[in-house]
Amino acid sequence: LLNEYLLKNSKTKEDKILYISKFLDKVRTTIFRQTKFAEFEMIMHDKYDQNISLTDDEKILKTLTAKNQDPQVRIAAINKISNEDKLVEIAKEEDNAKVRNIIFEKITDKELQKNIALNSGKSDVRLDMVKIIDDEDVLSQIVLNDEDSVVRSEAIKKIDDDDFDESLCYY
């Protein structure tokens, strides 16, 4: 009703365009939001059909982090996950650096950090992890084996071993 009133009583073409644009934007966001609710309900029903406990919050949260496009939703879900193995799985595939760094803050296990730095298929994920780790053996492996020159360069900056620096001259 308000939109009809505003359109009928607008004095310029620009005002009409503005009111129509705002109305269409509200329709678009409503459709998007309702689609997300339906997606969540579908996930919950699938979990029920597969006899997965609906109280296993971390599995549900992991699914949300994988499927939701909104970084804020993914961050909220990640903040509720305490299982570091699940966080590693998410981190290896996360494209958003801010979300990834929040995950990395939660991963304290050095072996898991090493796993990400050495085995992630994404160079930006490996690069972000290199900035965090301080194990010179792992950094040396990265310098010698990583396919990305930027990742290797960042790793070598963190190594304080003069003998290693000399050995690179012969590599």
Image (tube, rainbow, N blue to C red):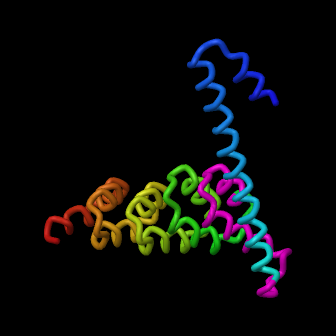
Relative to 171, 64 lies left or right: right
Q: Quadrant of residue 5?
A: top right
Relative to 51, 22 lies left or right: left
Q: Position of residue 12 (x, y in %)?
A: 60, 14
Magenta span includes 75: yes
Q: Position of residue 139 (x, y in %)?
A: 38, 66
Relative to 162, 92 lies left or right: right
Q: Position of residue 89 (x, y in %)?
A: 57, 72
Q: Which residues are magenta?
A: 49-78
96 w.r.t. 21: above or below: below
Magenta span includes 59: yes
Q: Residue furthest left?
A: 170
Magenta stretch, main secondary structure class: helix
Q: Nearer the viewer, residue 93 or 22?
A: 22
The residue drawn where x is 71% and y is 65% is 39
Relative to 81, 154 lies left or right: left
Q: Quadrant of residue 23?
A: top right
Which quadrant does the N terminus fall into? top right
Which quadrant does the C terminus fall into? bottom left
92 w.r.t. 99: above or below: below
Count the marks.
0
Q: Residue furthest front?
A: 8
The residue drawn where x is 76% and y is 59% is 37
Q: Nearer the viewer, residue 171 or 152?
A: 152
The residue drawn where x is 65% and y is 31% is 22
The residue drawn where x is 59% and y is 56% is 69
Q: Quadrant of residue 109?
A: bottom right
Q: Nearer the viewer, residue 114 or 23?
A: 23
